[in-house]
Amino acid sequence: MFEGSIELVNVTKEFNVGQPLSKIALNDVSLTVRQGEFVGLLGMNGSGKSTLARLVNGLIKPTAGKVYVNGLDTAASRSLIEIRRQVGMVFQNPDNQIISSIVEEDIAFGPENLGLSRAEISERVEWSLQAVGLTELRQHAPHMLSGGQKQKVAIACALAMRPSHLVLDEPTSMLDPRGRRELGEILTALNQEYNITVILISHNMEDVVGADRIVVLHQGGIYMTGTPAEVFTASEQLAAAGLRPPEIVQLAENLRRSGFQIDRNIITVPKMVEYLCQS
């Protein structure tokens, strides 16, 4: 068990235990995410991604094994409030997390429930708004914002609790390409500037090209892990898990087959453009 980490130790999660429709969503999974890591968690629907996210936050408990957050056991009821403060959760649909009629009031809701002073709450709200670039929209009604802006509100609400870890479950599924790009930039900045652990769950490869490490789930287990370049260029393994590399990685592979000497670490469009301009 490591301090300053999220750790799953031989975790199995079975739903409807003992019933005819029982299902094992995760099977004997062990995974450690250290403080300050940016981890991309990939997998097809039903691979266990969302189950893992909810285990980390203590929303559900493992059927077997242990989940620790900064040394706290998620199975201990007395630790859940602190665990949920330390692990901020952002879900697929931000509308499900927005509860107030004004943006800054929504962000203040969590800190208010911690019993903090007005000065502390105000400071946290201001910092969270600046971190996601929503300062100018603080007095707006959340339901009038775009999908990308709503997702930023959801992230700001999590940040106001001053978490050490941020877990995002398919946060880009309702966003357009610009919204995806902006969200990726925000998460990278939070990770690099504030050392916040980021676990970004997606089935879209492009969402996690900036991660330090990729973990691929398949049929409830860890199927493969490595750097983005290592995982994205293992096309046959990915195909077996029902996944495809980003289009730019597929293009690079096709060029290599045609005789071009392209570095396998080229996994983004800017890097490809830079390579082609130097060739």
Image (tube, rainbow, N blue to C red):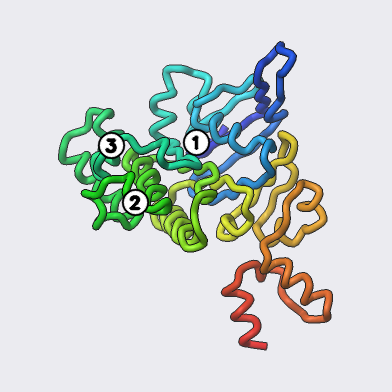
The answer to which of 270 and 5 lies nearer the viewer is: 270
Can residue 215 be seen from the camera position used here?
yes
Are the two marked residues, 3 and 2, in contact with CB atoms closer than 8 angstroms? no
Can residue 37 be seen from the camera position used here?
no
Q: Real-space Cα distance between discs 2 and 1?
A: 39 Å
> Is the residue 7 above or below the residue 170 in the image?
above
Which is more foreground, mark 2 or mark 1?
2
In-image side of 78 versus 142 (left or right)? right
Q: Which residue is mark 3?
A: 100
Quarter of the image where the N terminus is located: top right
Which is more foreground, mark 3 or mark 2?
2
- Could you tell which of marks 3 and 1 lies nearer the N-terminus? 1
Q: Real-space Cα distance between discs 3 and 1?
A: 35 Å
Are the two marked residues, 2 and 1, in contact with CB atoms closer than 8 angstroms? no
Name the outermost residue toward the front: 144
Q: Residue 264, located in which quarter of the rendered image?
A: bottom right
The spot of residue 135 in percent (x, y) is 25, 55
In-image side of 146 versus 200 (left or right)? left
The spot of residue 84 in percent (x, y) is 42, 30
- Which residue is depicted at the point 44% across and 29% down? 83
Q: Residue 78, located in which quarter of the rendered image?
A: top left
Q: Which residue is mark 1?
A: 3
Are the two marked residues, 3 and 1, in contact with CB atoms closer than 8 angstroms? no
> Is the residue 165 above or below the residue 212 in the image?
above
The spot of residue 54 in percent (x, y) is 54, 31
Q: Real-space Cα distance between discs 3 and 2?
A: 13 Å
Name the outermost residue toward the top: 18
- Give the numbered dot on residue 145: 2
Q: Secondary structure at mark 3?
A: loop
Q: Secondary structure at mark 2?
A: loop
Label 2 Cα neighbours within 10 Å, binned few <14 / some 14-19 / many ≥20: some
